Amino acid sequence: MAKRLLSYTKGYRILSIICPIMIFIDVQIELQIPKVMGEVITLLYSIGTEGMTMEAVRSQLISKLIEMLLLCAFTLFVGYIAARCSSIASMGFGANLRRELFFKIQSLSFENIDKLKISSLITRMTNDVSSIQSVYSQTIVIFIKGPFMLVSALIEARRISTELSVVFYVALPAIVIVLTAMAVMAVPLFKKMLKATDRFNGTLRGNINGIRVVKSFVREEHEQNKFHDINTEVMKLNVKAQKIVLLITPAIMIVIYGCLIFSMLRGSKLIIDGTGMEIGEMTAFTNYISQVLSSFMTIIMVFISMIMAKASLDRIKEVFNEEPSINDDGADESLKVKDGSIEFRNVTFKYGEKAVKNSLENIDIKIESGETVGIIGATGASKSTLIQLIPRIYDATEGEVIVGGENVKNYTFKNLREEISVVLQQNLLFSGSIKENIRWGKLTATDEEVEKAAKAAEAHDFITEFENGYDTELGQGGNNVSGGQRQRICIARALIRRPKILIFDDCTSAVDTATDAKIRAALRGDDYKDITKLIIAQRITSIMDADRIIVIDGGKIDSVGTHEELLTKSEIYHEIFVSQQEGVLAQ
């Protein structure tokens, strides 16, 4: 995983190298400041002693003050360069990691995504990546500066007084113990917080996506209470973890101030006893103490951040290690779908290895290219499951699915799915204009092709009624158009591709029967007669003029035939027809 993380620095490695160089220079400059400060104190202390007067030390004092100002200015400049390089490099690292994670998610099958959960994937793409990005930024700045400063300041401190330097042998282990104990307590809480954040995102996503349902059922208060509970849980876990983290600074400061007090008391005695230490050296030594202990503290703090970020790293690693349950490895890239013929050969399917019951069993059916086939059955009969095997959304557990005379596994995903258009009942539109949404099915489509597809989908008339016509901007998910209009735009998007196979998964449920009939009439026209059409429907009127109708019951094919044939030989089909006719008459 470390090797993989390093690969995400591509494009920003020079900045990542410049940053430590600048930090090394910065450390060397900062080490000079205590020396100069000590020399200034010694000069001031010498006034009036040994014949030294203010006039005698004035020129030296001015020179030292100028030197200190230059050192401070230079360290600010170098620090700025390091911070800027760090900021750009870490942002680039985060962008690369986020991009690769997104690409990985795109490669996963529906089974993988169901396993990882969408809300959790969103958290991993945002919170977890930001956490790792922050640690990377800290690593190339603080974690590198810390050892440089620690070793260099320790050497300078020992050079001034070996006796006083003994304080470090007590302080450094004390800091390690304090920080390690607090990290052990905090890390489990951060892991719990991340899991709670997943649930929070899931609740939030579900509420926003279903806001119309919430309002229509007047369930705002219920949703508010549910949100309050999960939001409070996240807050409490965060507060618990932060309470421990917040204790780190005062605990470390107690150690630092303890060291300073010891050094000042012992150093003062050495100065008074006249054993060779000067007051300026004492000042420099105390500054080096602060630098040594502060550097050590920052090293441990970054180390703790790394431990806490490990929870995020493990979650991202889980995504990268997830192998798609369906892939096109070994597929023939040159193999194209020659026609729209479809065949199911003794197909059985179940959702996952642990599933107890098969969703489909012993499916044997052959559909000719250009044929229109209706599919009907009770809710939960696995109609949608059947058609999802054609574009390899899922793979058959047993048996073969043949498209264009070849097993679907022999095609690459791209070559197979480019020839199959699926229009779902729950249609999704993207932010942008109506034209852009239709053209999404074929990015190179002309305005004439867009209009032609819209007319076939019975969408042209209502589109032109908008003030901006095809350039009308759609809201998120197409929430500023009706359900029927959204379905027709999605049908147009599917038609513009001119696929060899067109699948309607109950996608005309939100349109009236007259419009439904017009769409079916358009699909029977010469422009679309060579396309194989599979139509899943709840209304028999949507499929009664199909070449054949498949009746599915409990994941098995009950019967196959024309509308007239099924009325006599399929009890299930006959019951559906009668119940729907009675419903029409009752109206």
Image (cartoon, helix red, strand yellow):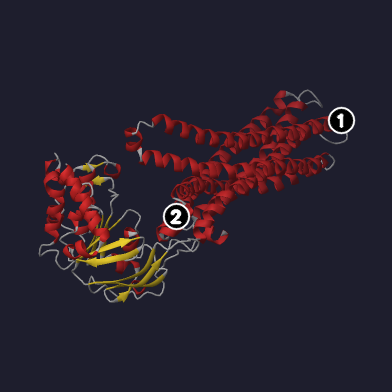
Nearer-the-camera pick, 12 or 461:
461
Question: Of helix, strand and loop, which one carries label 2?
Answer: helix
| Three-letter amino acid code of the residue under disc 2 | Asp
Image check: 433 left or right of 254?
Answer: left
Image quadrant of residue 304?
top right
Picture quadrant of residue 51: top right
The residue tagged 2 is: 114
| Residue plotted at (78% across, 42% down) | 168
Left or right: residue 117 compared with residue 562: right
SS class, disc 1? helix
Amino acid type at mark 1: Lys
User: Mark 2, residues whose alpha carbon is within 10 Å: few (<14), some, or many (≥20)?
Assistant: few
Q: Which mark is residue 269?
A: 1
Q: Position of residue 333 (x, y in %)?
A: 33, 74
What whole-number distance in Å separates the C-alpha atoms at marks 1 and 2?
71 Å
- Residue 78 in view (yes/no): no
Q: Quadrant of residue 462?
A: top left
Q: Which is more foreground, mark 1 or mark 2?
A: 2
Instruction: Determine whether 155 is above or below 545 in the image.
Output: above
Q: Is residue 54 left or right of residue 391?
A: right
Quick check: can you spot residue 261? yes
Quarter that holds the C terminus: top left
Query: Does 198 appear above or below 397?
Result: above
Look at 24% across and 59% down and name the residue there: 573
